Amino acid sequence: MKRSTTTPMSANKRAHLKALSGVITAWLALSVVSGCDSSAPSQAETKSEPSEMATLVPQADGPELMVIANAQAEEGSIGAVRQLPLPEVLEATGQVTFDDKLVSTIISRLTGRIEYVRSSQWEMVHRGELVMKLYSPDYMSAEAEYLAATSSAGHSGGAGTQTGAFGMPAAMSMAASMKEAAVRKLDLLGFSPAEIAAIRTASPSVWVSAPISGIIVSKNVVRGQAVNPGDQLFALATLERVWITADIYEDDLARVKVGQSLEAVTAAYPGEVFKGTVQRISPALDPNIHTLQLRCQVDNPGSLLKPQMLARVRLITSPRLALVIPQSALVFDDNGYFAFIVTRADSVERRRIEIADWNEPGYARVLSGIKPGDRFLTTESLKFNALWHAAHGRTS
């Protein structure tokens, strides 16, 4: 019988191989599991993807809603729009300007040249005071016509007895008409009745006087300058009373009326209170910020108020209600303010609103965009705005 050449495997060696096979099998299984899970995001990565946590749902009859997870919605506290009484004092910021009823200008009525300037800018002058001397041949011709007409009227009494219209002697009627035309011409050139009566000789140079008492607020000529008809030479104004043009919000319009009393204060004179009334209310408002202007006439004793000075106007009004929202509920985006209005337990609406200042820190007054009773997210506005942008970018 032939003998086998294969050596039987010992018991120890078989046990060692069996153990090694188990380790390899376990390692391969672990590698497969790790390879399958390597592409799955971790929990932290899931939270960093806001677009996976919100979905935009278009509405047929309204703006699109953002549907979010219930757990995410609970992260933002929910509040309701409140109505609070407005203060009885309505305040508005304004700017001081001249009252145009107290402004007068000196305008050139002919072609000529400035011979002499007697007054300077910001100088106080009185009515009738000479401010400059103007040269023009037109003055000489107008004065010569007047002197000739006056002389003819004085000698027309010795004319013949021929009568003209209305039974007057014809020569007298013609002389009177010539004189009347000459006086009218001088009047159009700026001569006063007293100056016309004082004319004795014709001169090309005439002194120009101040039409009112006031301050020279603008001076546009110098000595030797040529002027033409219509050129503004001087502007004079008085500051015994001024205008303050103030801006109010559209929502406050019903609280203001023409003739309403007011007080004005300035940073320059904090201890001075200036009294006035509302004279005009602008017929149009600024559509961008929903404000309109008031023109307030204010007494200015001592001429303390100056044009372009800022002033704070206070009006006593009847109390009304205003909508108030916490500033933490607002987010500034796309050149406007937005709030997230809660429509259902799992959805919100990103709504644009118009706001104004409020006297309580941390709050804003709502002019438009929400109504009493609307519920909104009071916190986490920036986070929900990021969710909205992410979801909107995923669906666009």
Image (cartoon, rainbow, N blue to C red):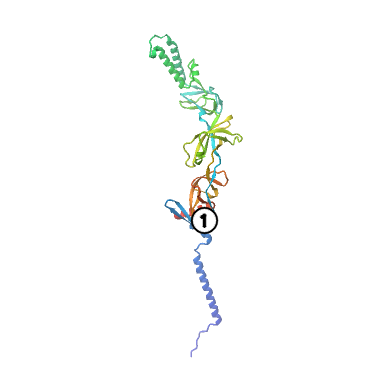
Say what secondary structure mark 1 lies in. helix
Quarter of the image with the C terminus is bottom left
Name the spot of residue 94 as percent of width and height, x first: 54, 37
Q: In x, y percent, where is residue 338?
A: 50, 49
Q: Residue at x 53, y 78 (%)?
A: 18
Above or below, comparing residue 30 to residue 194 in the picture: below
Q: How many marks?
A: 1
Q: Is residue 16 visible?
A: yes
Q: What residue did someone put label 1 on?
A: 73
Q: Is residue 310 above or below residue 377?
A: above
Viewer-closest of 190 and 32:
190
In the picture as drawn, the residue positioned furthest to the right comes out as 271
Q: Amino acid type of disc 1?
A: Ala
Please name whichever residue, 377 or 266, is drawn nearer the observer in this view of the structure.
Answer: 377
Horizontal placement of 325 versus 149: left or right? right
Q: Position of residue 264 (x, y in %)?
A: 57, 35
Q: Position of residue 221 (x, y in %)?
A: 51, 27
Q: Residue at x 44, y 53 (%)?
A: 58
Q: Residue furthest bottom?
A: 1
Residue 219 seen: no
